[in-house]
């Protein structure tokens, strides 16, 4: 389980908040040169970035998922690697492999480890659900432990380390659904939808012209790590933390006080990591919006991306065309908010 720090005292130094906001503004300014629209998606990816979480990005082809991730890695001055996941991809193809190397002066042969593409700061795992479970398991260790094991040796990955994975929801033939343990390692499941007409017109106009904007590197890896520490200093009131926990607990059919529709439609509810990510994400969202404390609205705004891949529906839900988003929205309406109105 991820080792989250306990909430600290409220931030009384506005310089800390301004530091994150300056980084946010610089990143957004550069992203806007390439990406049009998708404000909510960009905010979620930035929250994951500033908290050290991983993102699963779901959407049909042609919605700039890969472009967004590649552009972000460039802006952050981080080492970026793209891995195209295929059915024949093996664990060694992403972690690295030991090879025999001969010293030309002595003639002695030694084993040398050749690093795989996981040895980068930002990993784009493209179509992650197309690779077999053995390779998915190798990625799972990297996501959770920030290290990989090859040839009996353990190698630490360079920080910061982010995995931003994509999957296509419409082409399911020949895919391997991600196991629940790996889904739980993703902080968010971000759903990318089609652009509004006005934004689509802007994209078509920009991409069919001779314009070729270049983005600048505005934030370093060390600054990103410093922002991770900053976010964890944000104050969260007990009422807000309790609301987040109650929202997550209500999604579990094993709880006696869970709603009847949860017991009917849910086979497995969200675990403890969901509560942790709601609070941690809420801290980053609060800072991005110029506040030094987490509000109920922060928790509610992050409920869908945090919970949609952690609430698993059963056959009865599928037969009634009920998905996890329907259940989460009903929980948001049902779970009472604190009277203080934070």
Image (tube, helix red, strand yellow):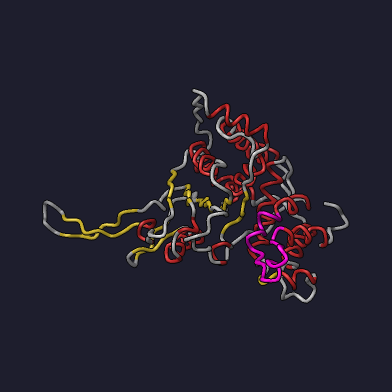
Residue 265 lies in quadrant? bottom right
- Residue 259 drawn above or below residue 233: below
Name the image quarter holding the N terminus.
Answer: bottom right
Confirm whether residue 280 shows in the render: yes
* The residue stretch that appears in magenta: 303-325
Q: In this view, does 63 lie to the left or right of 292?
A: left
Confirm whether residue 54 shows in the render: no
In the image, farthest residue toward the right: 339
- Let me know if residue 136 is in the magenta part: no
What residue is rendered at 69% in x and 61% in y?
A: 324
- Residue 46 drawn above or below residue 205: below
- Let me know if residue 318 is in the magenta part: yes
> How many numbered marks, from 0 up?
0
- Residue 113 drawn above or below residue 313: above
Q: Is residue 63 left or right of residue 243?
A: left
In the image, farthest residue toward the top: 210
What residue is rendered at 52% in x and 27% in y?
A: 208
Residue 147 lies in quadrant? bottom left
Closest to the observer, 225 or 145: 145
Closest to the observer, 80 or 329: 329
- Residue 225 drawn above or below residue 32: below
Q: Residue 315: percent from the left, percent from the top?
A: 67, 71
Q: Residue 251: percent from the left, percent from the top?
A: 72, 67
Q: Is residue 146 left or right of residue 295?
A: left
Q: Residue 270: percent from the left, percent from the top?
A: 67, 66
What residue is rendered at 43% in x and 50% in y?
A: 83
Q: Residue 250: percent from the left, percent from the top?
A: 75, 67
């Amino acid at each position: 389980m991820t080792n989250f720090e306990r909430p600290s005292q409220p931030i009384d130094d506005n310089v800390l908040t301004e530091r994150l906001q300056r980084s946010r503004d610089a990143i957004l300014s550069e992203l806007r040169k390439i990406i049009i629209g998708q404000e909510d998606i960009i905010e979620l990816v930035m929250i994951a970035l500033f908290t050290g979480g991983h993102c699963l990005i779901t959407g049909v082809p042609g919605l700039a998922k890969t472009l967004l991730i590649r552009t972000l890695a460039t802006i952050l001055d981080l080492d970026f690697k793209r891995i195209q996941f295929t059915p024949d991809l093996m664990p060694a193809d992403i972690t690295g492999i030991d090879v025999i190397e001969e010293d030309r002066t002595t003639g002695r042969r030694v084993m040398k480890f050749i690093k795989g593409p996981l040895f980068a700061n930002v990993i784009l795992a493209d179509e992650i659900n197309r690779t077999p479970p053995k390779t998915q398991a190798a990625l799972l260790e990297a996501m959770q432990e920030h290290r990989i094991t090859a040839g009996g040796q353990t190698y630490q990955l360079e920080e910061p380390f982010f995995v931003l994975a994509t999957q296509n929801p419409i082409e399911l033939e020949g895919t391997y659904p991600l196991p629940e343990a790996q889904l739980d390692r993703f902080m968010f499941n971000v759903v990318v939808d089609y652009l509004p007409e006005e934004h689509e017109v802007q994209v078509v106009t920009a991409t069919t012209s001779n314009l070729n904007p270049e983005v600048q590197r505005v934030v370093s890896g060390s600054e990103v790590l410093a922002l991770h520490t900053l976010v964890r200093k944000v104050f969260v009131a007990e009422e807000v933390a309790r609301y987040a926990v109650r929202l997550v607990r209500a999604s579990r059919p094993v709880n006696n006080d869970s709603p009847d529709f949860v017991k009917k439609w849910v086979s497995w509810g969200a675990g403890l990591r969901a509560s942790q990510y709601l609070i941690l994400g809420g801290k980053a969202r609060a800072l991005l919006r110029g506040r030094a404390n987490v509000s109920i609205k922060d928790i509610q705004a992050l409920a869908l991306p945090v919970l949609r891949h952690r609430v698993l529906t059963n056959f009865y839900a599928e037969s009634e065309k009920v998905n996890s988003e329907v259940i989460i929205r009903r929980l948001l309406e049902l779970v009472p908010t604190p009277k203080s109105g934070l």
